[in-house]
Image: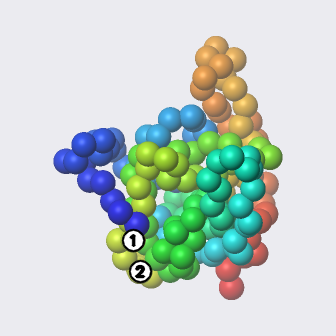
């Protein structure tokens, strides 16, 4: 996938975050690096017929602090495989269809394969499975309501 660096127009100058620090938000400001652990089968395109629709697939990704579900769109489904180390720039961590919390590049973000197989990671907590609630003093801010109760993802089977 193409990558837009910090010196190009629209590139991000934001700091890198660890997956454990992800908080749901409707902004494209997630800059992180992770390893792809597993990838589910492609989901058929759906949505409005008058809008271009692409296939999607869900991946389990992780860094040394946490894991998350990463939504791949169109060509991204073929571009990344388990074991790939990926840099996400200007990504988004937010709710997607049916209240599924996912990390994704979105329209403004970029993904780039930066390595293979050589990254420490943990499978828990899975930030996509944490229950979140609105902060009482600021409805735009989300806080963890309940941590994910399982030591592994509820969507992907544990790695052997």
Q: Quadrant of residue 114?
A: bottom left
| Residue in view at x 65 percent, y 32 percent | 143
| Residue in view at x 52 percent, y 69 percent | 75
What residue does disc 1 label?
113
What quarter of the picture does the N terminus occupy?
bottom left
Q: Quick check: 88 left or right of 48? A: left
Residue that protrudes farthest toward the left in the picture: 7
From the top left corner, tell me how far across and down residue 58 is, in percent: 66, 65
Q: Quick check: 12 left or right of 76? A: left
From the top left corner, tell me how far across and down residue 5 is, in percent: 26, 53
- Per the image, label 1 sits on a secondary structure element best described as strand
Report the colour scheme.
rainbow
From the top left corner, tell me how far across and down residue 26 is, in percent: 56, 34
Q: Is residue 135 above or below residue 120?
A: above
| Residue in view at x 73 percent, y 47 percent | 48
What residue does disc 2 label?
116
Q: Quadrant of residue 57?
A: bottom right
- Per the image, label 2 sits on a secondary structure element best described as strand
1 and 2 marks in contact (CB < 8 Å): yes
What quarter of the picture does the C terminus occupy?
bottom right
């Amino acid at each position: 996938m193409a990558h837009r660096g910090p010196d190009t127009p629209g590139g991000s100058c934001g700091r890198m975050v660890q997956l454990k620090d992800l908080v749901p938000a409707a902004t494209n400001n997630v800059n992180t690096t992770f390893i792809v652990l597993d990838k589910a089968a492609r989901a058929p395109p759906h949505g409005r017929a008058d809008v271009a629709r692409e296939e999607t697939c869900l991946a389990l990704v992780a860094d040394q602090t946490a894991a998350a579900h990463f939504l791949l769109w169109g060509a991204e489904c073929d571009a990344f495989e388990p074991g790939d180390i990926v840099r996400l720039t200007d990504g988004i961590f937010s709710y997607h269809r049916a209240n599924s919390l996912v990390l994704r590049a979105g329209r403004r973000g970029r993904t780039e394969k930066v390595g293979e197989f050589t990254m420490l990671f943990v499978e828990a907590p899975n930030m996509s499975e944490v229950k979140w609630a609105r902060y009482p003093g600021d409805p735009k801010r989300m806080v963890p309501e309940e941590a994910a109760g399982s030591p592994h993802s509820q969507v992907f089977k544990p790695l052997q």
